């Protein structure tokens, strides 16, 4: 009995795998045709077909049927529910694919332009940083030169004071003596 169960489970597992391998994804074709009639109703004979998505001209219509003229110039009647005001997917998909390609190209151009502008800005920032650093160095150099010049001026003033003060004092003494002698 246990062997029978084991055989049954094995067969069940194998059949499940076989079924799952048989399933494949497929798509329904949009190559459909619609029958057209010689008059506005189901009681009129079938005179041909028009392809799904084919462009036709609506000449006249009644409650349920419309008289159309196809690209070959043939006139026939078709149920109004089979007609749409929007183009079929067959004609819209290539247009949409072209739009996607155009927009993708534009987006790529925008990305390229943006990357180029970013690189240009980074280069300008680097150049500005270089100029700023150069100006800072020059400013520091000029500050140092100013400090040296101020020290030289201070040293000259001190030197002048120490060298000229005795001369000034002796000159004042001589002027005072002369004035005293001249007044007396």
Image (cartoon, helix red, strand yellow):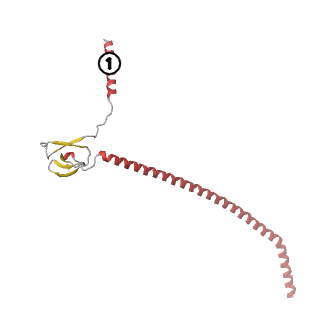
From the viewer's perspective, tell me whether residue 119 is left or right of residue 85.
Answer: right
User: Can you identify the residue that label 1 sits on?
Assistant: 11
Quarter-wise, where is residue 128 in the image?
Answer: bottom right
Q: Residues within 10 Å of mark 1 (few under 14, many from 20)?
A: few
Q: Position of residue 181 (x, y in %)?
A: 87, 85
Q: Is residue 166 above or below residue 115?
A: below
Q: Residue at horizontal 74%, vertical 65%?
A: 149
Q: Quadrant of the C terminus?
A: bottom right
From the viewer's perspective, tell me whether residue 95 is left or right of residue 58.
Answer: right
Q: Is residue 114 above or below residue 144?
A: above
Q: Considering depth in this image, is 85 or 16 the residue closer to the camera?
A: 85
Q: Residue at horizontal 78%, vertical 66%?
A: 155
Q: Position of residue 135 (x, y in %)?
A: 64, 60
Q: Is residue 24 above or below residue 61?
A: above
Q: Position of residue 81 (x, y in %)?
A: 19, 46
Q: Quadrant of the N terminus?
A: top left
């Amino acid at each position: 009995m246990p062997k029978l169960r084991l055989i049954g489970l094995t067969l069940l597992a194998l059949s499940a795998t076989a079924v799952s391998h048989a399933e494949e994804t497929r798509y329904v074709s949009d190559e459909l045709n619609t029958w057209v009639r010689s008059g506005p109703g189901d009681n009129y004979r079938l005179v041909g077909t028009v392809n799904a998505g084919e462009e036709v001209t609506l000449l006249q219509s009644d409650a349920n049927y419309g008289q159309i003229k196809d690209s070959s110039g043939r006139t026939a009647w078709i149920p109004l529910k089979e007609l749409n005001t929007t183009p079929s997917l067959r004609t819209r998909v290539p247009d949409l694919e072209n739009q996607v390609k155009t927009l993708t190209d534009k987006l790529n151009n925008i990305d390229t332009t943006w990357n180029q502008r970013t690189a240009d800005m980074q280069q300008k920032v680097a150049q500005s940083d270089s100029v700023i650093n150069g100006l800072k160095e020059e400013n520091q150099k000029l500050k140092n030169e100013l400090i040296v010049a101020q020290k030289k001026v201070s040293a000259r003033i001190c030197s002048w004071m120490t060298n000229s003060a005795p001369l000034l004092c002796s000159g004042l003494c001589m002027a005072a003596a002369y004035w005293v002698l001249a007044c007396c």
